[in-house]
Amino acid sequence: MDTSAPPSPHPYPLAIIGAGALGLAFAARLADSVPVAVIARDSQRAEALRQGVPVGARLRRLDVFGPNEAPAADWVIVLVKTGDTATAAATALAMRPRGVLSLQNGLVEDLLPAAGPALLAGQGVTTEGAWRDAHGVHPAGAGETLLPPGFEPVAELLVAAGFVARVAPDIAAARLAKLLVNVAINPLAALFRVPNGALLQPPHRLLLDTLVHEAWPVLHAQGLALDEAAAHARVHAVATATAGNRASMLQDVLAGRRTEIDAITGVLLKLADEAGLELPVHRAVYTLIRTLEGTAA
Ligand SMILES: NC(=O)c1ccc[n+]([C@@H]2O[C@H](COP(=O)([O-])OP(=O)(O)OC[C@H]3O[C@@H](n4cnc5c(N)ncnc54)[C@H](OP(=O)(O)O)[C@@H]3O)[C@@H](O)[C@H]2O)c1
């Protein structure tokens, strides 16, 4: 059987780096309306995926490549875990795109430090969701995707594929609001090994509210467009709406994988240091997660 990558239009209008849960969920939907190149971690993984991967109810045969065979693409979306961002960014640069968009969790700073000013690079936020297991990729309910200004062509491709997506002039505030939710819910869910909704109940609730209280001045100074009461309300609303979900950091801990704590709590602590603020509970939570990962200093 011929397992080589299919012949590609040159360049692809869109590429996704990261053939995981969210990358394949995005790629499968997009591929119905636009040619999409998917870049997997290595060529063996790419070859296996080209045989077909179940995404939702359908077996999908996508244009999957290893990083060394990555084709040119106009726009690249990065959907690797944040610990793999630097490698994925190098692959993205080699694809000579007009722009590179991260839809990862956490705050991804310096997505393309080596890129020149002609290349657009930015981070959006998405509430799309997906998970994967041995049977394939399972997209979760529909969400919304916000993109930084300049990524209008990507928003159009997403909308054409049926996504709810738009360019958000206030993307920095949206990223900070998502970071607020992530720094509060993700580490606690992972430490206590509970679904998100349990964090609203004693004894976890006290810690949840303390994390929001500590994080708020730091994020507000950065441009978070919520007062402290609204910040608490936002976190409570997300925990309620996702009450039965296992946060991604909990899934990572249970699977023995490295977590995204550095791009979440780690970035918050860095911002706090720069502002001369102490966040003792976040620092303790950060250390505990690193200890769970077996990577504590
Ligand atoms: N899943 C969700 O519902 C969701 C929702 C919102 C945001 N996010 C964010 O989206 C990002 C991806 O999450 P995910 O759940 O899709 O993670 P995932 O299932 O672990 O997928 C990441 C994929 O990237 C691959 N990869 C790693 N390094 C690579 C490289 N250098 N080049 C190409 N591929 C590489 C991994 O390969 P291996 O399989 O070999 O490790 C894996 O298949 C994370 O930042 C996450 O926080 C996820």
Image: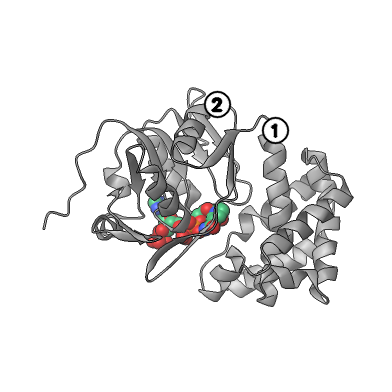
Residue shown at the point (64%, 32%) measured from the top left: 168
| Numbered mark located on residue 170 in the image | 1
Q: Is residue 203 above or below residue 166?
A: below
Q: Is residue 206 above or below residue 39?
A: below
**Which element type, helix, strand or loop, lies under badge 2?**
loop
Q: Residues within 10 Å of mark 2 (few under 14, many from 20)?
A: some
Quadrant of the rendering where the N terminus is positioned: bottom left
Q: Quadrant of residue 166?
A: top right
The first of marks 2 and 1 along the sequence is 2
Pick the front one: 276 or 261: 261
Provide residue 82's location: percent of width, then percent of height: 54, 53
Q: Residues within 10 Å of mark 1 (few under 14, many from 20)?
A: some
**Which element type, helix, strand or loop, lies under badge 1?**
loop
Q: Are marks 2 and 1 in contact (CB under 8 Å)?
A: no
Quadrant of the rendering where the C terminus is positioned: bottom right
In the image as oriented, which residue stretches furthest toward the top?
Answer: 118
Relative to residue 168, is residue 14 drawn left or right?
A: left
Residue shown at the point (82%, 43%) measured from the top left: 226
Provide residue 186's location: percent of width, then percent of height: 67, 63
Relative to residue 225, is residue 55 drawn left or right?
A: left
Q: How is the image coloured?
A: one colour
Provide residue 175's location: percent of width, then percent of height: 67, 43
Q: Is residue 142 above or below residue 70?
A: below
